[in-house]
Structure formats: structure tokens, C-alpha cells
Image: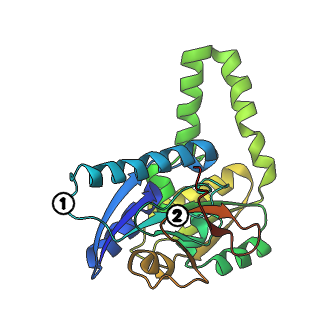
Amino acid sequence: MRIHVIACQVFFRPLSWLAARSAHTVSISWLPQGLHDTPSRLNQMLRQELDRLEEQQEKRILKHRPQAIVLGYGLCSNGVVGLEAGEVPLIAPRTDDCIGLLLGSQARYLEAFARHPGTYWVSDGWMEYGYVPTREALEQRRRDYVEQYGEENADFLMEQDQQWRKHYTTVAYIDSPLGARPEFREAARQIGEDQGWSLVEYPGELGLLERLVNGPWEDEEFLVCPPGHRIIASNDERKIAAEPRKRSE
């Protein structure tokens, strides 16, 4: 089976590893980390990537048409809502965001959230490809502000930047099942120390990502959006559902 995955860059290492070991032929398009902060932008870029794949198929640029397109995204603040399946099914996991995928299940994420509701999550992928408030990152941000706005304004902007901290009490580090990265764990510990948060650790699990790449796409864990349908928010524990596109669209 030929499968094309469109995924957030935080999954680069685990999805690349799983794709290399898959019995299927798996190709992957990567989108930048952090798009979940602007769901409309995430939605736009996902649509553009789906359109690009469809155009390449129509122009016969692709030598082989994928038999399924898989999203390496959860609901992500409704960032996947409205995406349409073209000529092949569109597969999406029933998770809130990438945390459930990294932990191995939405249920495990909800259990962790119940124990520590004010949690700032980090993983190796976040450390490599995203912004996390390490000392080095904060120092660099302040230097950028000083260069652009001057010392006094930089202090004010840094203070405003840190307002989000009051919503958190814990930093949670998801340890990669592909091998320990002690420098990333130390960075997570340092973030907790600097922000006054406690540190908790969770072992990452590849199970859900493995099924995302290889199937089976059971309804409990995945939405299989058929051709001629689009993804909608289900507003329940299933997260997402599919509805037929209207004929006028």
C-alpha cells in the first residue's frame, strides 16, 4: 500500500524511523512546528499541501498515486477542521494534539492531564524544531528585542512574553522511545527550575504513531474520512467526524 503522510516536524525522528521499517511505501511531507498556535494558518498550510498532492497527481508528476493520505496532527485547536478528502481517504487520529500521539494514546494523555492540569509539555522533537523557554532561547529573544526596540522596551516585552507562565505549574518531559537524549531532559529540568515548576517525566510510546503509519485505522483511534467528505469537529470524546461535502461546493 502507498501512504502519504503530512505531519508536524516534531515527529521527524519517530515517523522517519517507522516509515523506514514499514511494509508499506510511505512518503512524508513535513510542516513547521508551532502552527497549532495559529490554527487558521495550520489549516491553510494543510489545505495547500493537499492541493499540491492533488495537482501533482493530475499532472502525473507523482509516479504513483497514494492510496491513503494520513495526517500527523490531532484536532489541534480545530486546525484540521474543514479539510477534504479528494480521491483517496484522509486519515486523522482522534487526539487533541501531538501529546496524545507521543504518549501512545489519547486516554494516556487525558490521564496525565487529570493528574497535572497545568502542564507545559516538551519532547525531543519540540526541543529540536520548536521554541521552548530554555535559558539560551530566552537570552536570544531578549537580544533580538534589544536590537529591534532598545533596552527599556526589551524589558517590557520580555515581561509581557512571560505572562503565559502563570497558567502552568509543571513541565512534563516525554522521553523518546528511540533512545535517551540526556541534554533534552536536562533542558526540561532547567526550564522547570527557572520557571518554578515541578518536573515530571513520561515515557514516550510509538504504538499510536505506528498504527498511524501502518494501520489498522480502527474507528476508536482514527477517523477515516472517505472521498467526497470533509473533517468536522464532533465536539465529543471522538474529537472529529466526517460529513459529505455539499454538492454546491
Which residue appears at 54% of the width and 25% of the height?
Answer: 144
The residue closer to the viewer here, 135 or 17, is 17
Of the two numbered discs 2 and 1 on the same chain, state the one appearing first in sequence: 1
Q: Could you tell me the amino acid type at mark 1? A: Lys
Q: On the rendered structure, is 186 left or right of 51? A: right
The amino acid pointed to by label 2 is: Arg
Numbered mark located on residue 82 in the image: none
Asked whether residue 38 appears in the rendered view, the answer is no
Q: Is residue 122 above or below residue 40?
A: below
Percent position of residue 128, x then y = 44, 53
Classify 108 as above or below 181: below
Residue at the top extreme, as displayed: 150
Residue 63: mark = 1
Above/below status of 186 relative to 26: above
CA separation, marks 2 and 1? 42 Å
- Residue 68 on image: x %, y %: 39, 70
Classify mark 2: helix, strand or loop: helix
In the foreground, 225 or 91: 225
Marking on residue 185: 2
Q: Residue at x 39, y 53 (%)?
A: 30
Q: Quarter of the image holding residue 178?
A: bottom left
